Amino acid sequence: MEKPKLFIPGPTHVDSELLSSLAEYPVGHRSAQFSELYDEVVDGVQKVLFTSNRILLGTCSATGLMESAVRNTVQKRCANFVCGAFSKRWHEITASCGIECDSISVELGKATKPEAVREALETGKYDTITVVHNETSTGVMNPIAEIAEVVRDFPDVVLLVDMVSSMASVKVEVDKLGIDVALASVQKGWGLPPGFAVCSVSDRIFERSEQISNKGYYFDFKVMEKYAKKSQTPTTPSIPHMQGLRAQLARIFKDGLENRFQHHIKLAEEVRSWVRQKFDTFAESGYESNTVTCAGNPNGIDLIEMANRLLKRGYMISGGYGPLKGKTFRIAHMGNLQMDDIRDLLTTMDNVLDEM
Ligand SMILES: *Cc1c(COP(=O)(O)O)cnc(C)c1O
């Protein structure tokens, strides 16, 4: 049976050429060939993130690195800024690790604002904050540059950023902004199959990690750093994903990094303008995501029926997440999707809505 084309916010569409790059014969993970692959991947990820910070590779989904980021970093107290399901998850992860933390939340559909970050940091209670750049559940893109600017006024505070659904699709200059940890899995903005994650880690995070005990082994940044210095990972990584990343990075640089970011802005504008004609956008005005659009349903259309009809025609979109289930739906425009894919989807959605 033909598989539907994915317009869901992860896993995202992978074309067959890219897919086949994950089917190379493996190399031994203590071999020179592996270290060459490792260095290529690390170098490429650094370029995409505009950083010279160390890149760590995780054979896990992004959630693994969300957990390791807080475990390796918080010595005093963590402020988790929450604006939807994934940012809320990071708070739950932090609390479940036994780390002192507070959730500072806004109404669903709203963005985390720099003023709220300043207000929290002025209390002097926190040494760490977590922010989700692109809240995939609500289609909100937080103003990360403005937030980072505030954090830079507090030299003892480190900034951990979930870039799961924006990395490699939206431009974020990690070093310029002073982001201490930027993390993502590869099945969203990177456009690869799921099962692998990457992050950039600043020196001050390694300094903190050095002083923290009980981090476990698999997600200890200091253990990962020790092997990274030899261009290796502590344990056997998903080598197919690294081969896939190498292929994807080559493609990204061939197309041009800036072109890729511009391309995603154009896709977002196309989807948003369609959504505004037929539905409405759920995200606060001015904070709409450039990789996923969350649509509200002002006319009470049967969203399940709509999604089912689309699926029969070979297109998979996504329903609302968590408390937004049944109230919103989401169209992803991240990763490998092209303008023709988006136009095909929107034309088909027009046809489906006419029939309903
Ligand atoms: C998907 C997603 C996650 C979880 O990623 P996994 O790779 O499934 O662990 C976390 N944060 C955001 C913003 C996401 O979109």
Image (tube, rainbow, N blue to C red):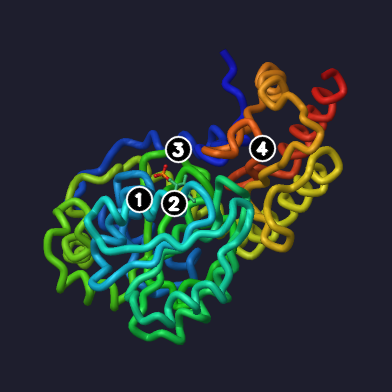
- SS type, badge 4: loop
Q: Could you say which disc has been placed on residue 278 in the image? A: none
Q: Earlier in the sequence, mark 1 or mark 4?
A: 1
Near-viewer residue (250 or 49) = 49
Using the image, tell me which numbered label, if any, was put on residue 193: 3
Residue at x 71%, y 37% (from the top left corner): 341
Pick the quarter of the image with the C terminus: top right
- Label located before the other in sequence (2 or 3): 2
| Residue 220 figure quarter | bottom left
The crowding category of the residue bearing disc 3, from other C-alpha atoms within 10 Å (few below 14, some 14 to 19, many at least 20), is many
**Residue ID for mark 2:** 88
Residue occupying the far top of the picture: 1
Query: Which residue is identified by label 4?
Result: 328
Q: Residue at x 60, y 59 (%)?
A: 141
| Viewer-side label of 2, 3 | 2
Label 3 element class: loop
User: Which SS class for mark 2?
Assistant: helix
Q: Which of labels 3 and 1 is toward the front?
A: 1
For label 2, the crowd category at 10 Å Cα-Cα, with few meaning under 14, some 14 to 19 and many 20 or more, is many
Q: Is residue 4 visible?
A: yes
Q: Amino acid at mark 1?
A: Glu
